[in-house]
């Protein structure tokens, strides 16, 4: 387990309390499958200069990250979503790169947790 503040292990404990390891595995499986697809959709929106597409892509990333305690991912997705809603495209590209990097950093922890007995 990581001591990195970008991941709040307590979120996993809350999920486990609600639905046991099965719910934890299901939620993490969804996040691990879904977030990369939504990141790609956000990049497509960026390439197209479409803030609405970016907003639609990062909103579920924010929600999913919150559910599993990926705080850095959640925070960045929230910032990007607000910028996209305000049609402020200029700061979004570097933030999307930060979002991808934050997800890459927490990915091993989430995979380990999903695969834990």
Image (tube, grey):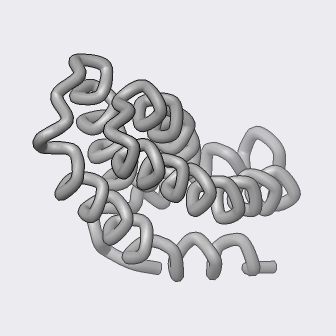
At 62% across and 44% down in the image, what residue appears?
14
Q: Residue at x 74, y 54 (%)?
A: 30
The reply, left or right, for residue 99 in relation to residue 94 is: right
**77 lies left or right of 110:** left
Task: Please tell me which residue lies in front, 80 or 4.
Answer: 80
> Residue 94: in sight, yes or no?
yes
Is residue 33 positioned above or below 23 on the image?
below
Residue 97, quarter of the rendered image? bottom left
Front residue of 93 and 23: 93
Residue plotted at (57% across, 62% down): 36
Q: Position of residue 109 (x, y in %)?
A: 52, 77
x then y, percent, for residue 22: 87, 57
Left/right placement of residue 72 relative to residue 39 reads left
How many marks on residues? 0
Q: Give percent across and percent down for residue 41.
A: 54, 49
Q: Hey, which residue is sitting farthest front in the picture?
A: 48
Residue at 75% from the left image edge and 62% from the top image edge: 29
Instruction: Give coordinates of residue 61: x percent, y percent.
Output: 51, 44
């Amino acid at each position: 387990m990581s001591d990195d503040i970008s991941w709040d292990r307590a979120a996993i404990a809350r999920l486990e309390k609600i639905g046991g390891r099965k719910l934890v595995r299901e939620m993490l499986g969804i996040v691990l499958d879904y977030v990369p697809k939504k990141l790609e959709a956000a990049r497509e929106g960026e390439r197209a200069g479409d803030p609405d597409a970016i907003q639609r892509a990062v909103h579920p990333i924010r929600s999913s990250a919150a559910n599993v305690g990926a705080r850095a991912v959640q925070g960045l997705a929230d910032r990007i979503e607000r910028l996209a809603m305000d049609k402020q495209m200029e700061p979004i590209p570097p933030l999307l790169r930060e979002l991808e990097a934050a997800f890459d950093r927490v990915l091993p922890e989430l995979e380990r947790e999903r695969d834990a007995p």
